[in-house]
Amino acid sequence: MLTLTPVITVSYEVKSAFLFLSALEFAVGILTNTFIFSVNFWDVVRRQPLSNCDLILLSLSLTRLFLHALLFLDAIQLIYFQRMKDPLSLSYQIIVMLWMVTNQAGLWLTTCLSLLYCSKIARFSHTLLLCLASWVSRKVPQMLLGAMVFSSICTLICLGDFFSRSGFGFTTMLFMNNTELNLQITKLNFYHSFIFCTLGSIPPFLLFLVSSGVLIVSLGRHMRTMKAKTKDSHDPSLEAHIKALRSLVSFLCLYVVSFCAALISVPLLMLWRNKIGVMICVGILAACPSIHAAILISGNAKLRRAVETILLWIQSSLKVRADHRADPRTPDLC
């Protein structure tokens, strides 16, 4: 059996480094997702129609803003309030449960994005698949609504189960003075709620895998067709396949990494009481959505143009300031 040395307390230097890393990841996550949200929401303000992809990105960025806030609260709670030798506090458990249901909502939205990519880019020959792809591309708002309804139902069920078990555990602790027994009851309740919330992520993850697999098969067929017909390297369909797969494969890798980090953090927190290990897992959980947001920006033409516009504006502002400092006689129009 794997055993780790308990690290109940950590040094001030480790806490400071973890706090700095958490603040940096929080800032990057908030910046990237606020940028995605602002660019798309500005089109809503100007009453310009949003594409299906932009609508999903708008919803996904809003979800991830909440996700980063929860992860930063988790880090603060872990540094200053949660001690490894004590049972998990109710506030820490609530933060973990809210993170799980928010992460599940983000998974549903990414699955919708994967289905949209598959319907728009993949090439089908079967009539049923063509009809299904056409239906998906026309029903994205309804898909988003359905994903949010299903995610909300799972959230209510998970939180209801969690609070009912927490209430039962609290009542049991009032009538029992056995500290070790109370700790075991808290662990069992948390394990059950964690597994119960994890089960809700299985349907969207399977849909994501299926749609990504279909896109990969379509890419392979398209590349074989292009090799047989022409040697022209510039193929818009091929580029669209590659951009979509880059986004989906990156999300798949990041989601698997974050899911493994979440699974590992539970025994580190409850069994081995290794605070440094839990800190590393929380850092990984915060880094993954930030990296994926940056990949989404690089793969979206509208977001790239917005980044270029901002960079040009910053460059011109710095140039004006430099020219003004070089020639102080230049009148200040402001």
Image (cartoon, rainbow, N blue to C red):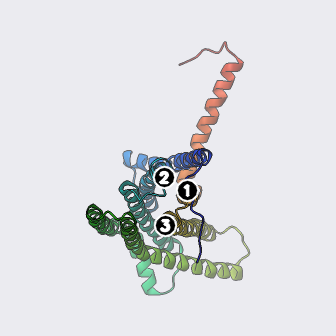
Q: Disc 1 versus disc 3: distance between alpha carbons?
A: 12 Å
Q: Secondary structure at mark 3?
A: helix
Q: Secondary structure at mark 2?
A: helix
Q: Quadrant of residue 299?
A: bottom right
Instruction: Report which residue position mark 2 lands on.
Output: 78
Residue drawn at x 65%, y 82% as measured from the top left = 225
Mark before the other along the chain sequence, 3 or 2: 2
Kindly identify which numbered label has been placed on residue 266.
3
Q: What residue type is disc 2 on?
A: Leu
**Quarter of the image with the N terminus in it:** bottom right
Q: Is residue 62 above or below residue 323?
A: below
Q: Position of residue 83 (x, y in %)?
A: 47, 54
Kindly identify which numbered label has been placed on residue 279.
1
In the rendered structure, are the residues bearing label 2 and label 1 in contact, judged by CB atoms less than 8 Å apart? yes
| Left or right of 218, for residue 95 | left
Mark before the other along the chain sequence, 1 or 3: 3
Q: Is residue 249 above or below residue 322?
A: below
Q: Disc 3 versus disc 2: distance between alpha carbons?
A: 13 Å
